[in-house]
Image (spheres, grey):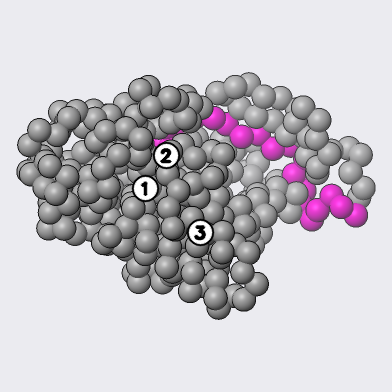
Amino acid sequence: MVTNGRYVLHEWQHGVRNGLWRNPVMPWDMRGRGNIERVVTRVVPEASTGYALWLENEVDLTGIPELELQAHLEQFPEETQQAPDLSVLYFGFALDKAPFDNVHVRRAFSAAFDRQTFADQVLQGQCLPMKHFAPPGIFGAPPIDAVGVGFDPEYAREQLAEAGYPDCEGFPQVTLLTFSGQGPQHEAEYAQAQWEEHLGCSLDLVQIEQLPFREHIEAVNAPAEDRPHIWASGWAPDYPDENNWVGDVLWCKNPENARRRECSALDVLIVEARDEPDPERRITLYRQFEEGFFGPDGEMPIAPTCTQIGYSAVHLWLDPGPLELFSGVRWYDWTIDWEAKLAAQGD
């Protein structure tokens, strides 16, 4: 792997750790303000493992497990970093595979999911409910509550009945695929319970499967007969424009259209908005196709659930600098008070 950035790859032990060393040939005036020569990221199966390492002063920064968040905020308020990361969690549907090739089924499963309770209780406040796709902070995104059905159990039951499955009678067994880990398992079980409570679909009708990230992606892109019916996923933007959401994810001509969406009038609007030079006109178009996807009569190709608000545990000896939402992690501007770190580690 050839790199020419401020850090270069030194080691990669798959599933264990990655090591990046400072690039020795980077000009001094481009090296950045930081004093970190080596960055090691550890790969751990559970957030609780990373957090335990942080408590033992073995890592400088880590995520906070959902079940530990409140206790951490009370005990370490000055060692907490909070930031909206503009990513949105959602459930994808296999649009070319029964029963989710039926738009009424997709609407029902989306509207039967209580996003506020999911954000408050399952994700411990690390999330804001989303009824449409693009979150606040993205140009052209409608206000967070302005577009979309969201959670509406009565509407959900009506849609499932219209699909031919009143009270989930006759509904086939389906697979819900999520990522490996305790957190994703809890989230999938919450969805499973929601569909039982609000649609009448018993727990055994929604079979949960978990796969590591790479295998998860491969399964989602497999032929229809081998693909899950529903899958947990998410999207984080590459640039702050609505086109990066509906255009790069939902547009029917996207080469990575894993949902197998057929083209419709909405795709004409997506192209029109992408090419339109007038910002106000673009905003109007964006609202139209967000409504066309996620409103009461929408296609519902996916079911957005929430936009994440991330918390990280950061030791006081580390100064990661100002939050950057789109430029990636600027390790080259991070600084460590080495005396404080070594003292905390007992060295």
In the visual, does 249 lie left or right of 35? left
Residue occupied by mark 3: 268
- Residue 235 on image: x %, y %: 49, 48
Query: Which of these two is toward me, 36 or 92?
Result: 92
Q: Quadrant of residue 119?
A: bottom left
Q: Give the residue displayed 26% in from the left and 42% down from the top.
A: 102
Q: Is residue 105 above or below residue 205?
A: below
**Label 1, label 2: how many angstroms apart (C-alpha)?**
8 Å
The spot of residue 73 in percent (x, y) is 39, 56
Which residue is situated farthest in the bottom direction here? 280
Callout 2, which amino acid? Arg
In this picture, residue 77 sits left or right of residue 300: right
| Disc number placed over residue 302 in the picture, else none | 1
1 or 3: mark nearer the eye? 3
Is 47 magenta? The answer is yes
Q: Can you give x and y, in whole percent of width and height, for residue 159 in the image?
A: 17, 51
Query: Which quadrant of the rendered structure holds the N terminus?
Result: top right
**Displayed quadrant of residue 319:** bottom right
Q: Amino acid at mark 1?
A: Ile
Magenta part of the chain:
29-49
